[in-house]
Amino acid sequence: MASLTPAAAVQRALTNVGRSMGDRRCPTSDIQDAIDDEYRTLRRRLSAEFPTIYEKTSTTVTLAGSTTSFAKPTDCETIRVLEKQAGDRWSSLPVVTSLNRDEVNCLAFYEAGANVVIVPPASAPGTYRMFYIAEPAATVSTYDVPDGIERMLVEMGSAFIRQRHNEDPTYHIQRAEKIWEDAFMGLWRRYGSHGQSGLQITRVW
């Protein structure tokens, strides 16, 4: 994994467009904020295609008595799989839609804010764990992406600078997408293809 810092990303983006520092129209703090936003978008794109890059496993949670819910990990962005322990094995639970969650007869779950709710209530007692996609920290100290992919952030930071100065950002946007295309097959071989998840990518790089 690459370990590009925000400060280094800003400097590389400025160098990429032939500037040594920010100015009043495009201060370095604005550039960093823009690259931070691009990083979160890129993380979601990577998670949609290759979920195991940012996948984590929660600690086990045991529900007893009339308890039917438990809190998700604080860094959980998307639940991939929720499992219930059955002896020495684990069984995955389907997601129940909110339209019929009070009528479901088989063991299932749904998300309610920061919690996971198990239905039907009579079947809830037991031990659970989840595999989930971790969200980036609120304050980013390192752009944690696969090696080579960090160059996309530099190019998108460069595009932001160009736009702020009323210059054409097209080259940098196209360059970012070319970096993705060149890296895709290598990532596919390493992490496998998981197809489309619930996180659909709507942004055009």
Image (spheres, rainbow, N blue to C red):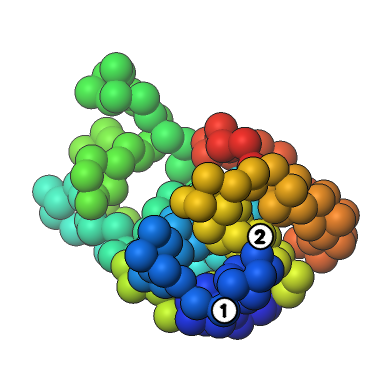
Quadrant for the C terminus in the image = top right
Quarter occupied by residue 16: bottom right
Residue 109 in the image: x percent, y percent?
A: 35, 39
From this view, report whether residue 145 is shown above or below residue 174.
below
The residue that disc 2 covers is 155
Q: Is residue 124 visible?
A: no
| Nearer to the camera, 183 or 132 | 183
Residue 110, by quadrant, is top left
Secondary element under disc 1, as helix, strand or loop, is loop
Instruction: Report the amino acid beneath label 2.
Output: Glu
- Side of 4 where 172 appears, left or right: right
Residue 166 is marked as none
Determine the residue positioned at 15% across, 51% down. 67
Residue closest to the eye, 121 or 140: 140
Horizontally, is 203 left or right of 83 in the view?
Answer: right
Q: Residue at x 22, y 44 (%)?
A: 113
Q: Dot 2 surroundings within 10 Å: few (below 14), some, or many (20 or more)?
A: many
- Which numbered dot is residue 20? 1
- Residue closest to the eye, 164 or 179: 164
Q: Pointers 1 and 2 in contact (CB under 8 A)?
A: no
